[in-house]
Image: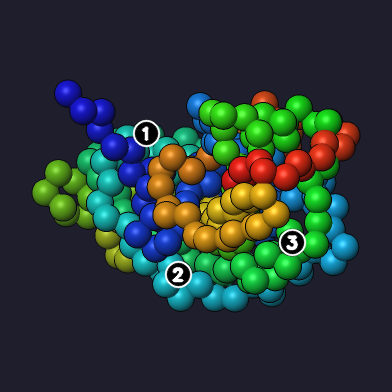
Amino acid sequence: MAKKKDPSITFLNKFGYNVVRLPRVGIEPMDIIGRDETTQWLGPISSVWTSTVPAPVPSPPRVAAAVNGQQTDSLDISFGMKILANALAAFGASVPSLDVSYSRARSVQFAYTNVTSTVVAPLDAGNYLTAGTLKTGNPVVQHYFFGQEAEAYLIIDVLKSNSITVTASDQHGVGVAVDVPAIQGVVGANVTVKSNNTSNSSITYTGKEAVTFGFALQEIQRDGEVWTLHGVEPSGLTSFGVKGMAAAAGAGGGEGQSTDSSPIILGSGCRVRI
């Protein structure tokens, strides 16, 4: 029997974005993520790339009209609680799980609000890479840039929000009420909880700081002396999380990330995906 697809890691794909499984601050355009058996954040490209031109400056945050306020399809409650728990943890909730509060629900829909997009133009990223060289000596670079079973990608667009709306329904699609004051008492002072309707089935959770919850990628390949740049189709395969999120927040950190930044040399004729 085929494994059931997890919509908690694909729900942004139809908007052209990949999912950050554990939303957090510190994930920005011009960061690299690596993929082998898992997918993880590796850090800013400037830490392994030396260029004769300045790194491109990301755009100011702009309203992401295509995503802002758009509801997901109805998700099974088990998948929905994963998304909610991750979002609340990112917003600073003291207790990120609300399974008991949603025990009567069988499905939920989500909508991120106050969504902004921060972008680096692919042409600017291409100029930066063309005028630069990859550092050598870093075992993380060796694995993801040169390994046969690993790939590295460049983030060029991130979605940020400090607010998520959750609408709960029963098995018949009828709204299910939740106890707003009780939830507010559980999540703590860092997150505000507000009902959007009289039935208390649609609740908005708002944190104090916007976190990155989605991203778009570009893939760069090098054949000899020529760089090519093109988009990567959004997929659950490029969704990633960050272990130890609370400890790493603001400082950066990924699953199995190495902090070694010693240099390596990019030889001609190699094929690299960034």
Q: Residue at x 62, y 29 (%)?
A: 147
First in sequence, mark 2 or 3: give its number. Answer: 2
In the picture provided, is 125 more to the left or to the right than 11? right
Rendered location of residue 46, percent (x, y): 80, 52
Rendered location of residue 216, percent (x, y): 53, 58
| Residue position marked by numbered label 1 in the rendering | 100
SS for tag 1?
Answer: loop
Name above or below for residue 4 compared with residue 74. Answer: above
SS for tag 2?
Answer: loop
Mark pair 1, 3: CA separation? 53 Å
First in sequence, mark 1 or 3: give its number. Answer: 1
Mark pair 2, 3: CA separation? 34 Å
Q: Hey, what amino acid is under mark 3?
A: Thr
Q: Residue at x 62, y 67 (%)?
A: 122
Label annotation for residue 87: none
- Foreground pick, 221 / 64: 221
| Residue position marked by numbered label 2 in the rendering | 68
| Residue 174 appears in view | yes
- Foreground pick, 61 / 69: 61
Q: Hey, what amino acid is under mark 2?
A: Asn
Of badges 2 and 3, the one in the foreground is 3
**In the rendered image, which quarter contains the N terminus?**
top left
In the picture provided, is 86 more to the left or to the right than 30? left
First in sequence, mark 2 or 1: give its number. Answer: 2
| Residue position marked by numbered label 3 in the rendering | 130
Q: Mark 1 packing: few (<14 Cα in 10 Å), some, or many (20+)?
A: few
Name above or below for residue 203 compared with residue 38. Answer: below
Q: Hey, what amino acid is under mark 1?
A: Val
SS for tag 3?
Answer: helix
